[in-house]
Image (cartoon, rainbow, N blue to C red):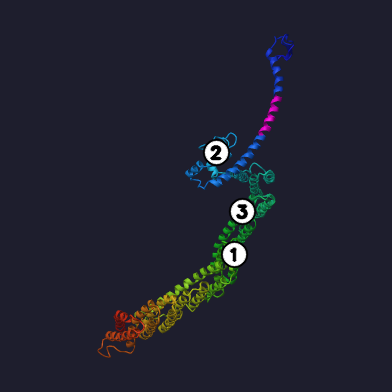
Amino acid sequence: MVSYPCPFCGAAAGLETGCSGCGRPPYPEAAEVLRLNARTIELYAEVEAARYSYGAAVQRYTAVQSERNVLAARVKAAVAAATLPAFSPRDTAARRAAQATWPAEATAALAGPGAEPAGAGAMPWPAGTAPTGEALLGQRPEAAPRTVQNALFILGGLLLGSAAIVFAAVAWASFGVLGRAAILAVVTLLTLAVPPVALARRLRATAETFAALGVLLVLLDGYAAWYADLAGLAEATIPATYAGLTFAVTAAIAGGYALATRLRAPRLAAVVAVQPVLPLLALHHGFGATGWTLVFVGTAAVGVLIGRTVDRLAWIAAGVAVLSALPPALHALATVDGVAGAARILAVMVLLAALVVVAGLTHERTVQLGAGVAVGLLAPAGARMAAELFPEQRYAAFAALALLLAGVAIVTPEKVRRGTRVGALVVTAGFAAPYAYFAALGAVQTVAHSLPAWHPRADWLASRLFDWQEPAGLALLGVGLWLLLRHRAVPWTTAALVAFAAPAALTAPAPALVCTVDGVALALLALAALRSDRWAVAVAPFVAVHLALAGLAGPGVTLAAYTVLGGLSMVLAARAADRRLGLPAAVVALLCLPVAGAAGSRLLGFGTAEQGPIPPALLGATAGLALVTLAARLLGRRCANAGTVATATAGAGVTVAAALHSTGT
């Protein structure tokens, strides 16, 4: 008899007698449930056995399929490299044309079980697993899985860091001092304990994120300790000093943690945390401009050291520190007083220049740049020191400093010589520019005091523009530029500028002295021009014009100046091998000699109203015409076109001579 428990009272019941407890009739469905329970247990055992068998089969299938895909990918790469040209990722038409011409044999060889039939568009992989043509031709996906993973971890770390900052800043009201310290300390320790565990499980991105968060929590711990006045820190320390110490401790902990775990995030955190340490420690110690320059130089030195040994990111911080050192350095150079102050800023600038050179030596592309910048940094500091040591001779000292830098630049090691030469060239040219300007100003002033012709001003150069330091400085700067450039234009340009500046350096120079200096300079230039020195030829006209105008101060000076100018021009016209030089020289000679004749007649006293009825203009013109005729006769033997030149210029020269003679009466 089939028995079952009564579903209503739980007493024993049978399909024939019913329930023995409540007397209910037989309940076949309750008995069937009991039977199916036993059957379910039997079938569950069968299902578990089948599941185990299926799992083993799936593993075997997956292993074989993976091995097959790896080999097929290698074969595919070899076929693609041998048969397909390289296309741009955007060249869709070319890719499709190449795909249409792939060898059918390669497609069939690579096709696996269940692959599509060979034909137009058929691919050598099983259905549903074939890569696209863009993937075969090297087009990359928009983002790699690891990139997405790192981005998510970074965002998560930023969110956690923001939450920690908010907690440390505004969530103190709900906790006591001990509670605050305990919460941050425990959270910091737990956060720093996560990266080693993550590294052990090869979760490097997770480790980097928690390491960065842990370093941030260390910094927040320092802030929390000061805010809560833990152990009297808030009262015992200055806020800026305590902040500097907190950053220093954070940098030390981050560096040690990075060294122990080989993670980059704490290493970068240490690089960032160490930057404000020195400025914060020096904030309330009364450092002047020189002291702050030294502080930033020290910060830059730390950045250079870290950049060369730990992480290249520190180079950016070092560059920012160097740029930050420039404003206080310029302020110190402009306001420092006394030799001691100048010596201090000079020492700091030497350190900065040495640091720039060391930083430049780290890469071959920056070696020359660092050397040139170092010379530029030393120049203003040296000039300030020279001004303090030689206050009365500072202009000559500046030029001597430029010459010294040029001399040092040409003997530096070959590795940095080009950079130092360029830097010294920029410095020397910068010093030479104002000297050249004042030399030109002196030339203009001597000419202005010589006009109108033969009627110079009574206070002819009564006050000088500058002293002997101007021509001396020009000479020194010319030597420095020649050492750096080794160009023939430098000495001749220097000679002309010195000739312009030398007379203006005297208190009351005679007009004859001005013309004498110009005449000597012009003679040297003419001698060089005869040797085919084109730079001497280029400079000579400027000196000649100055001599011609400055020589109008009086008849005697005019006679001497124009005789020298005309004679040198005649020599050039007769001796020059290049006709392009001889013809202009002949023109100058034929223009100058009539003026010299008019000055001579005026100097001898001929042609005045008291001495006879001859008009002064006619007498000057006659003397000029006679000299022009003589010059044309002499030049005719050496210059084939002297007659033509004489005819063209005689009228102009005679007219000038007559005008001058009339003016001088």
Q: Mark 3 or mark 2, which has the lower sequence index?
A: 2
Residue 337: quarter of image:
bottom right
Q: Position of residue 356 (x, y in %)?
A: 59, 63
In what quadrant of the picture does the C terminus appear?
A: bottom left
Q: Closest to the observer: 49 or 192?
A: 49
The structure residue drawn at horizontal position 26% and vertical position 88%, both measured from the top left corner, is: 614
Amino acid carrying mark 3 in the image: Val
Look at mark 3 in the image and give the residue it sits on. Answer: 272
- What secondary structure is the stretch in magenta mostly built from? helix
- CB of mark 3 within 8 Å of CB of mark 1? no
Between 497 and 363, the one lying in front of the other is 363
Callout 1 environment at 10 Å: few (<14), some (14 to 19), or many (20+)? many
Upstream in sequence: badge 3 or badge 1: 3
Q: Is 418 above or below relative to 464?
A: above
The residue indicated by pointer 1 is: 357
Q: Is residue 222 left or right of residue 646?
A: right
Estimate the spatial distance between the alpha carbons at disc 3 and disc 1, rounded to whole Å.
23 Å
